Image (cartoon, grey):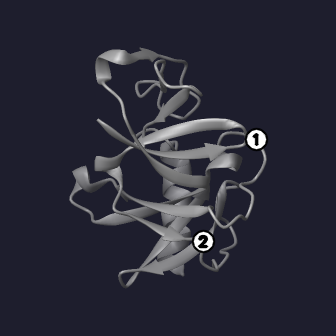
Amino acid sequence: MLLLLFRIGETWYGLDARQVRQVVPHVPLTTCPGMPVSAVGTFTYQGSLVPVLDLGLLLGTTPCARRLSTRIIVVPWREDRGIRQSLGLLAESVTGMTQAREDETTPGQSCFADSASPDVLAAHHRPMVRRLRVEGLLTPEAEQQLFAQVGRG
């Protein structure tokens, strides 16, 4: 599988490229009161408001630094429910792609809401790359709070 590489703090992560709609520059964001702590605002993407989560805040580290390589990774959200919604993921050093095979990964402990979607370590890469899964980034309560605020924007 092809992984989009980015950094959160000093840790490298990879996101399955099939889960990525587009990678856009860090654009100015509009803040909405009442959003979850990890949500840093919204922006308009293809005519719709898209909430943006700071992956640093979501992981419980420091907010993503604003660098030339800081990007918003736009991913589909809950299309299995027949809703075409997008979610933005703010990440640092979005710099490239790498190949990883599913059989070369080792299950790791999940750091997100859905423990059924654990992180996976791509052990053959140096530095090690943790695979991030879009599923399970938000608890159902945080998802409801986030998209309720976006709907009011």
Mark 2 residue element = loop
Residues at marks 1 and 2, CA–CA distance in whole angstroms:
19 Å
List x then y, in percent, for residue 49. 46, 77
Q: Is residue 6 left or right of residue 82?
A: right
- Callout in the foreground (1, 2): 2
Mark 1 residue element = loop
Say if 137 sits above or below 130 in the image. below
* Badge 1 vs badge 2, beta-carbon distance below 8 Å: no
Looking at this view, is 27 or 128 the one in front? Answer: 128
Q: Which quadrant of the figure has residue 106?
A: top left
Which amino acid type corresponds to the residue marked 2 in the rendered image? His
What residue does disc 1 label?
A: 61
Q: Is residue 85 left or right of residue 141?
A: left
Q: Which numbered dot is residue 26?
A: 2
Q: Residue at x 35, y 81 (%)?
A: 46
Q: Residue at x 64, y 80 (%)?
A: 28
Q: Residues within 10 Å of mark 2 (few under 14, many from 20)?
A: some
Residue ranking furthest to the bottom = 47
Q: Residue at x 52, y 42 (%)?
A: 139
Q: How many marks?
A: 2
